[in-house]
């Protein structure tokens, strides 16, 4: 079983920064992909950024140049550095972990609110 816990959300003014953390624990031999998704009220969940075990990253067009994803494989932890935040970035942010054993696990999310 794999547990995923997000942290680091909060209230920030437009133009500010936040750093989210995602920690995976449990029976994990390897993690293929760690990804951050977000869901705003009334909208579908969307991919924000992902990072593979080898370090290859992928970003949504809306966050390119502002957000940066990284991971610490030794700690089974991923980070999302969010800069130049906009009100439209307001959402629940969820971490997804896909292990080498085929487990797909989600955290409960952390709320990010950006005020104008």
Image (cartoon, rainbow, N blue to C red):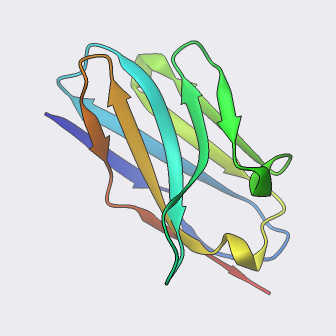
Of the 4 image quadrants, the one containing the C terminus is bottom right
Q: Quadrant of residue 24?
A: top left
Q: Nearer the viewer, residue 27 or 8?
A: 27
> For the point 46% across and 27% down, which residue is it?
33
Image coordinates for residue 5, horizontal then vertical, percent: 34, 49
In the rendered structure, the answer to whether residue 43 lies left or right of residue 18 reads left
Q: Is residue 87 above or below residue 16?
A: below
Of the 4 image quadrants, the one containing the N terminus is top left
Q: Is residue 112 visible?
A: no
> For the point 53% across and 62% down, which residue is it?
38
Q: Is residue 113 visible?
A: yes
Image coordinates for residue 45, horizontal then vertical, percent: 48, 63
Image coordinates for residue 69, horizontal then vertical, percent: 65, 37
Q: Quadrant of residue 87?
A: bottom right
> For the point 80% across and 67% down, which residue is it?
16
Image coordinates for residue 22, horizontal then vertical, percent: 44, 43
Q: Is residue 11 above or below residue 25?
A: below
């Amino acid at each position: 079983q794999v547990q995923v816990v997000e942290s680091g959300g909060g209230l920030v003014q437009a133009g500010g920064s936040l750093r989210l953390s995602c920690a995976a624990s449990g029976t994990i031999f390897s993690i293929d992909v760690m990804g951050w998704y977000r869901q705003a009220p009334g909208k579908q969940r969307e991919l924000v950024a992902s990072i593979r075990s080898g370090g290859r990253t992928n970003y949504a067009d809306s966050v390119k140049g502002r957000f940066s994803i990284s991971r610490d494989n030794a700690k089974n932890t991923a980070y999302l550095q969010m800069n130049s935040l906009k009100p439209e970035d307001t959402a629940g942010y969820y971490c997804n972990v896909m292990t080498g054993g085929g487990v797909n696990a989600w955290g409960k999310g952390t709320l990010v609110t950006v005020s104008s």
